[in-house]
Amino acid sequence: MAARTPMSSDMSGYSHSLSLRARHGTKDLSIIPTTLGMEAQRIWKRGEPRQAPAGTLLDGAYGASYCSIEFGVLTDLPQSIAAALTVLKPHSEFLQSLAEDGVQFAFFVGWFSEEQSSGGTLGVKLLQDLADLRISLELNFYAPDQVKP
C-alpha cells in the first residue's frame, strides 16, 4: 500500500490533503488509474469482501465500486486543485464518458485547521474547470483539537 500523501501547510492557518474519488454502483473502476497512469490508494468492486485500509478483513461486502487516487499538494488548496486538474484535463473525454455512464467523481479535501478559523477562496475559473470535468468537491473540515501531530 502506498504511503499517505503529505499535507501542505501555508500561512492561511490550515493544511490539506487532496484525492480524486470515483464511485459507481456496479462498474469496475480499475480502468481509471490505468488510463490516468496513476496508482489507486484504495480500490474495490461491488461485492468484494470489505477490508480496512491495512488489509484486515471486515464483515460484509462492498455495496458499490470505489477508487481513490491521492494527489500531491502544493502551498495552498487552489494551487493543489489546479495542479491536479492539469493532470486530468488531457483525459477529459475519458472522464466525461465515465460520468455519463454514472460514475460520480469528487475531489476529496481534508482541511486541517491549525487555528479556530481558517479559510480560502476557490476562484470561478477553478470551479468551472471542476464542473467541466464533472468533478464535485467534498470538503472535510478538522478543527484544531482534531488535528493529530
Image (cartoon, rainbow, N blue to C red):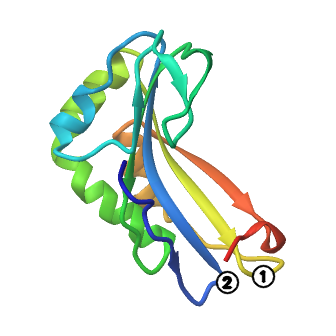
| Residue at disc 2, secondary structure | loop
- How far from the left and from the top, in percent, is residue 11? 59, 90
Point out the residue furthest to the front here. Answer: 56
Front-most of 149 and 140?
149
Q: Which mark is residue 25?
A: none
What residue sits right under mark 1 in the picture? Answer: 115
Decide: marks 2, 1 in contact (CB < 8 A)? yes
Element marked by disc 1: loop
In terms of image quadrants, where is residue 3? bottom left
Above or below, 106 relative to 79: above
Vertical relation: 96 (above or below) 54 = above
Residue at the location (60% across, 59% down)? 110
Residue 76 picture location, percent across and down = 49, 76
Q: Is residue 96 left or right of residue 140?
A: left
Please determine whether, in this image, residue 66 is positioned above or below residue 90: above
Residue found 16% across the figure and 47% down from its top: 90
Q: Nearer the viewer, residue 109 or 30?
A: 30
Label 2 and label 1: CA atoms lie apart by: 6 Å
Mark number for residue 13?
Answer: 2
**Amino acid type shown at disc 2:** Gly
Sequence-wise first label, 2 or 1: 2
Category of crowding for the residue at label 2, using alpha-carbon neighbours closer than 10 angstroms: few (below 14), some (14–19), many (at least 20):
some
